[in-house]
Image (spheres, rainbow, N blue to C red):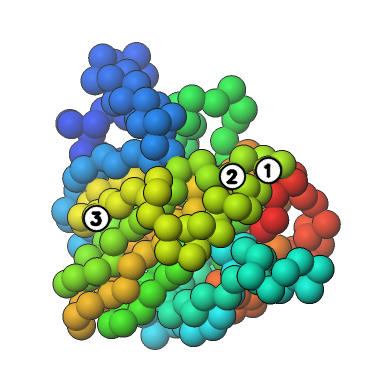
Amino acid sequence: MFDLDSVVDLDTYPIHRAGSPARAELVAEARQQMKAFGCFRISNFIRPEAIETMLAEATRLHPQTFWAEQEHNPYASAPDVSVPSNHPRNFMQRRMSGFINSDLLSQQSLLNQIYNSNVVTHFVWETLSTDRPVYQWADPLGRNPYGVMETDHYFPWHFDGNEFTVSILVQKAESGGVFEYVPDIRTPGHENYERVQQILEGGREGVRELDLLPGDLQLFKGRFSMHRVTRIVGPTTRYIALPTYVYDPWRMNSPHHSIQYYGRATDAHHQRAMVMSDGLLD
């Protein structure tokens, strides 16, 4: 049986105690930060021993990382010849990074157990202050992978295919690897290409930075807030766990997105590619 207390610092963050003042205060703070900035960090949320276990898992699976050095736009979609060459849909950036795909994790994986915890899922839902239920994602490759970045790697500006991501930093780079984001730059049904293009061309208005530490948990609206990870400096590999949550558990990344990020697309990705739940370019 999964012992949540051995993983999460429940003494400081009693997310398992519904109705407790400490939990209510944490949820209220998270909601305020998510509304204001589209992001919330909980420092030292995961216990050091659990981080060591996750680092050992990521290190063991490192040889199976899918590495990508390729050009893609912020939507991980194919270029669009129907719009100008300088349009965000055609703004190609070189990404150098990797993923340890979710289907490589064992059933006993600590990351899997955190992700499958109903206590954690319910807590994430409450922090988002939404009446719509939030689910664990069906995507077999991207539901809870490890992101991997090595020396000189860079993860350029992009949007996620899912609504919400919970990031847990497992190992920090010596330098660089800073998370940058623009909160709520787009909304369902409105891409806001003009603002997106300003950021892509180097604009800094509205850009926020978050330099995570191992054990920190970050809640983030990745489908609506464009974000990137700055270039890695030094020989230490950056590992980050990426549990993801969605409004529609049936939907997955588009096949093109999945191939760009995870190296392949399954039959299920192709079968579900026709579903567009929010009107946004994936």
Residue 146: x %, y % from top left: 41, 66
Q: Quadrant of residue 30?
A: top left
- Residue shown at the point (19%, 70%) measured from the top left: 175
Q: Quadrant of residue 112?
A: bottom left
Label 1: few (<14), some (14–19) or many (≥20) C-alpha neighbours in 10 Å = few
Look at the image and tell me in which quarter the N terminus lies. top left
- Residue shown at the point (70%, 50%) measured from the top left: 280
Q: Which mark is residue 245?
A: none
15 vs 184: above or below: above
Tags 1 and 3 touching, CB below 8 Å: no
Amino acid carrying label 1: it is: His
Instruction: Answer left or right for 133 relative to 202.
Output: right
Q: Which residue is mark 1?
A: 190
71 vs 114: above or below: below
Query: In whole angstroms, how far apart are the C-alphas of marks 3 and 2?
Result: 23 Å
Look at the image and tell me in which quarter the C terminus lies. bottom right
Q: Nearer the viewer, residue 102 or 87?
A: 87
Q: Quadrant of residue 89?
A: bottom right
126 vs 104: above or below: above
Query: In whole angstroms, how far apart are the C-alphas of marks 1 and 3?
Result: 29 Å
Secondary structure at numbered mark 1: loop
Taking the image as drawn, is residue 72 in sight?
Answer: yes
Secondary structure at numbered mark 3: loop
Query: In whole angstroms, how far apart are the C-alphas of marks 2 and 1?
Result: 6 Å
Q: Nearer the viewer, residue 56 or 32?
A: 32
Tags 2 and 1 touching, CB below 8 Å: yes
Q: Along the polypeptide, which appears first: circle 1 or circle 3?
A: 1
- Residue shown at the point (69%, 73%) measured from the top left: 85
Q: Which mark is residue 211?
A: 3
Q: Which mark is residue 186?
A: 2
Task: Tell me the mark number nearer the camera, choosing from 3 and 2.
Answer: 2
250 vs 253: above or below: above
